[in-house]
Each structure stands twice: as C-alpha cells, then as structure tokens.
Image (cartoon, helix red, strand yellow):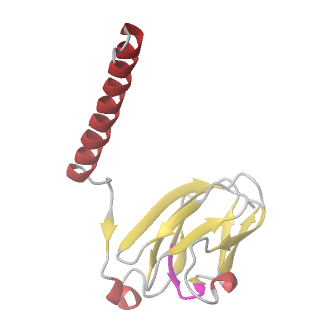
C-alpha cells in the first residue's frame, strides 16, 4: 500500500498539531503548579466562626465613603443578610465559607465568587445604579440551598 505525497503531508501536519497542543497543556499545567494564583488568603475553616475578623460579619464604612463587607456563608444563610451601600462608591467584599462550598452571586451585576472553606475570597466593585439586588448561592450546598439568599440595597448618595 502506497501513501501519496499529500496524504503524508497531512499526516505530518496533524501529528505536529497534536504534539504542539500536548506541549502547551503540559507546560501550562507545570507553570500553574509552580505559580499558584496570587493574593490567596487562607483561614482555618474550623475557626471561621471564632476568628477575630469573621466572627462578627459586618459592614464597615470608611471616611472616603468606600465600604468593606466582612461576611460568611454558612449552611443556607449569608451573614450579613442585608447589605446597604451608596451608589458609585467602591465596595470590597471579604468573604469565606464556614462549612461547604458556596457561591456568592449578586443577581443583575457581574459580582460572582466561589466561597471555599479555608480560603478568603475578595473582590471590589462599585454599583452604578441604585436599587435592591438579590444575592444567591449558585453552588449547590445542601437540601435547603434554594432558600439561601441575602439582599444588597444600593442607595443614592446623600
């Protein structure tokens, strides 16, 4: 059986592509294993509820009008349950989970984080529009997962 020239060319091109893609996969996985994501904060999940920062979920307003939300997600509840912020001011969310994997999604915005036990998730954003937004858990966390919600109230600046 004789393989034509064009068939051999296509076999070489296909083989080279497979080798190239495998090299990309191997090198990128090696690089990510050597360099974990930056700014990863950890916390002992067994002590989240007694930790000095997370034992009392709260909303801290700073002099410049920015807000820091320190919160936890536990089975079927977000703490704090209602978050009030000013429109246009930066809001930093520092969140963690005390038990299982939870999601933190503010419906109608681009705020979406996964809360893992043992890790602190942090992100900052400003809300350009006033209104009330639903916060839901978008990771299945148990039988009453559908009841896990909170609300974010964005108020007009005085």
Quadrant of the image occupied by residue 148:
bottom right
Magenta residues, dominant SS class: strand
Q: Residue at the location (43% across, 84% down)?
A: 98
Towards the viewer: 90 or 21: 21
Residue located farthest toward the left when viewing the structure as drawn? 34
User: Quick check: 158 left or right of 90?
Assistant: right
* Residue 51 showing in the rendered view: no
* Residue 16 showing in the rendered view: yes
Residue located farthest toward the right when viewing the structure as drawn? 131
User: Quick check: 48 left or right of 115?
Assistant: left
Quadrant of the image occupied by residue 103:
bottom right
Q: Residue at the location (49% across, 59% down)?
A: 123
Quadrant of the image occupied by residue 46:
bottom left
Towards the viewer: 70 or 110: 110
Residue 129 image point, x, y percent: 76, 54
Q: Residue at the location (32% across, 27% down)?
A: 15
User: Quick check: 155 left or right of 24?
Assistant: right
Q: Residue at the location (58% across, 54% down)?
A: 125
Residue 104 image point, x, y percent: 57, 69
Residue 34 image point, x, y percent: 20, 50
Part of the protein shown in magenta = 70-77
């Amino acid at each position: 059986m004789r393989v034509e020239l064009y068939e051999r060319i296509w076999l070489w091109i296909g083989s080279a592509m497979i080798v190239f893609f495998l090299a990309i996969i191997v090198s990128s996985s090696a690089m990510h294993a050597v360099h974990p994501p930056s700014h990863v904060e950890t916390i002992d999940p067994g002590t989240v509820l007694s930790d000095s920062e997370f034992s009392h979920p709260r909303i801290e307003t700073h002099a410049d009008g920015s807000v820091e939300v320190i919160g936890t997600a536990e089975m079927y509840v977000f703490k704090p349950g209602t978050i009030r912020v000013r429109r246009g001011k930066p809001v930093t969310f520092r969140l963690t989970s005390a038990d299982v994997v939870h999601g933190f999604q503010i419906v109608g915005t681009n705020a979406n984080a996964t809360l893992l036990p043992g890790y602190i998730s942090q992100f900052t954003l400003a809300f350009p529009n006033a209104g009330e937004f639903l916060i839901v858990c978008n990771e299945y966390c148990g039988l009453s997962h559908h009841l896990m919600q909170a609300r974010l109230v964005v108020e007009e600046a005085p």
